[in-house]
Amino acid sequence: MAEQQKIHPVPDVEAPPQTSPTAPLVPEGTLKSDRGKPVEEYPPFQRTLPAMHPKPPKKRSCFCRCLCWTLSLFLLLIVILGIIVGILFLVFQPKLPKYSIDRLQITQFDLSSVDSSLSATFDVSITARNPNKRIGIYYEGGSRINVWYTETKLCEGSMPKFYQGHRNTTVLLLPLSGQIQNGTGLLTTLQEQQQQTGNIPLRLRVKQPVRVKLGKLKLMKLKFSVRCGLVVDALSANNAIRIQSSSCKFRLRL
């Protein structure tokens, strides 16, 4: 039996080496320079800013809402009251009353022989004028009238209750009385001033509660004060006292 021959495959030396047809010669992302070396390409520089997040709106608290409503209602009330006062002013055209002291008579002004107290009794004539066409004045009880010399109260009294109508003039004759303890020094001072200057300054103060009547509407009680300064030629009993000057100022308080 003939010996079998072994056949060995011979490689083809003329075949080119197998390479991947899609492999690039230059790595991706680089540029080929003139010398054959690849040049890396960098992305352009970009400046990044921090992200800005909008702040959530603040919620108003219940207190702020209540305060805003309260202020709005208060302003509205002021506007309404201003309108009402303006209408009343145009309709009634209010004017302040006027007062004057017309006469002063002293019925008693002497010292007591027992305790040296000074007793004083004055009769004061006051004229009250109401110039309003549609406004009346109710003079209520609880008034007070004082007569002062410097810091010493000489006598006091009150006004009667009465109603003063529209455009009315009322003359009041008011008795005032008082007693000053240790009046010897005061009487001496008054006599010296009368001899030196020929006049004695006095101050008269009136505090009076009233009610104003607008048409048929009677308003709440108010208080007014009258301050009068007068100068007389003497302070002595049973003599004619002449008023040299007199001026009064009116002031209203709620």
Image (spheres, helix red, strand yellow):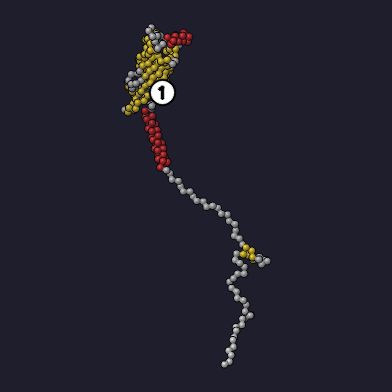
Instruction: Pick out the residue farthest to the bottom.
Output: 1
Question: Where is residue 15, by image quadrant?
Answer: bottom right
Q: Amino acid at mark 1?
A: Arg
Residue 174 position, x and y percent, is 35, 15
Tell me the quarter of the image containing the C terminus: top left
Residue 141 position, x and y percent, is 33, 21
Question: Where is residue 110, by image quadrant?
Answer: top left
Residue 44 lies, with reference to residue 195, above or below; the image says below
Instruction: Pick out the residue farthest to the left.
Output: 216
Residue 114 position, x and y percent, is 37, 7
* Residue 164 can be seen in this image: no
Question: Where is residue 99, by image quadrant?
Answer: top left
Q: How many dots with numbers?
A: 1
In the image, taking residue 202 as reference, residue 15 lies left or right, namely right
Q: Residue at x 40, y 36 (%)?
A: 74
Q: Residue at x 37, y 10 (%)?
A: 107
Residue 243 lies, with reference to residue 2, above or below; the image says above
Residue matched to label 1: 251
Residue 172 position, x and y percent, is 35, 16
Q: Residue at x 38, y 23 (%)?
A: 224
In this view of the protein, which residue sits in the foreground, 37 or 243? Answer: 37
* Residue 19 can be seen in this image: yes
In this view of the protein, which residue sits in the foreground, 240 or 144? Answer: 144
In this view of the protein, which residue sits in the foreground, 122 or 56? Answer: 56
